Amino acid sequence: MPGTFSAMPVKWMTTQKSLKLLKKEKYGRLATCGKDLQPYITPVNFILMDGRIYFHCGFEGQKIDNLNYNSKVCFEVSRLGKLYPAPHAKNFSNRFWSVLVFGKARQVKDEKLKLHILNEIMEKYATGHDYAGLTLEDTKTVNIVEITIEKITGKVSIDPPK
């Protein structure tokens, strides 16, 4: 007998909760679109600082070509949680949360700001490791992209009613 798929109930998160999860996550996925209108997704290390997302990358490539053509981006972080198996495949489900950011990206040119951002990235990803500090000269060899958040949404699965 046919039935309907059951899904884990979800609820929308507040902006504050979405930003909190975004800040804690280590890896995000950046969606861009270029002249050919083909969506392109890139995983990136990032920081959330002063209400903006920053990541480092090269100066060339499809991601940069797309950003130069169209500054609108979507950025996503998510986490898959516990699997809830069921006797029938249509009733399997997972706990999860996800955050989507919609905004505009630009390349950061100010070397002092780039140095500050790079130091924040090192703080997030290299805490507890010894390394030589960065200099203003180092900022010339790396590209920093800033995403200004225009809209943020988040949702989280919740336990089904008993």
Image: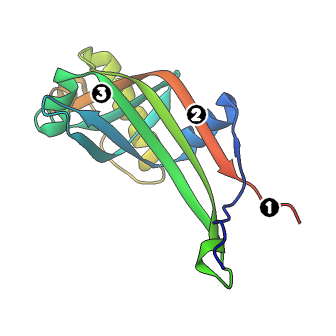
Camera-near label (1 vs 2) is 1
Badge 2 crowding class, 10 Å Cα cut-off, few under 14, some 14 to 19, many 20 or more, is some
Q: Are marks 2 and 3 in contact (CB under 8 Å)?
A: no
Q: Is residue 36 above or below residue 127?
A: above
- Quadrant hosting residue 154: top right
- In the image, 138 versus 22, the foreground residue is 22
User: What type is the residue that disc 1 sits on?
Assistant: Pro
Mark sitting on residue 39: none
The residue that disc 2 covers is: 153
Mark sitting on residue 145: 3
- The total number of labels drawn is 3
User: What type is the residue that disc 2 sits on?
Assistant: Thr
Camera-near label (3 vs 1) is 1
Q: Is residue 52 visible?
A: yes
**Residue found at x 62% / y 64%:** 81
Badge 1 crowding class, 10 Å Cα cut-off, few under 14, some 14 to 19, many 20 or more, is few
**Residue found at x 55% / y 41%:** 99
Distance between the alpha carbons at the discs numbered 3 and 1: 40 Å
Q: Is residue 149 above or below residue 159?
A: above
Q: Is residue 159 above or below residue 107?
A: below
Q: N-terminal of the two: label 1 or label 2?
A: 2
**Residue found at x 75% / y 55%:** 158
Q: N-terminal of the two: label 2 or label 3?
A: 3
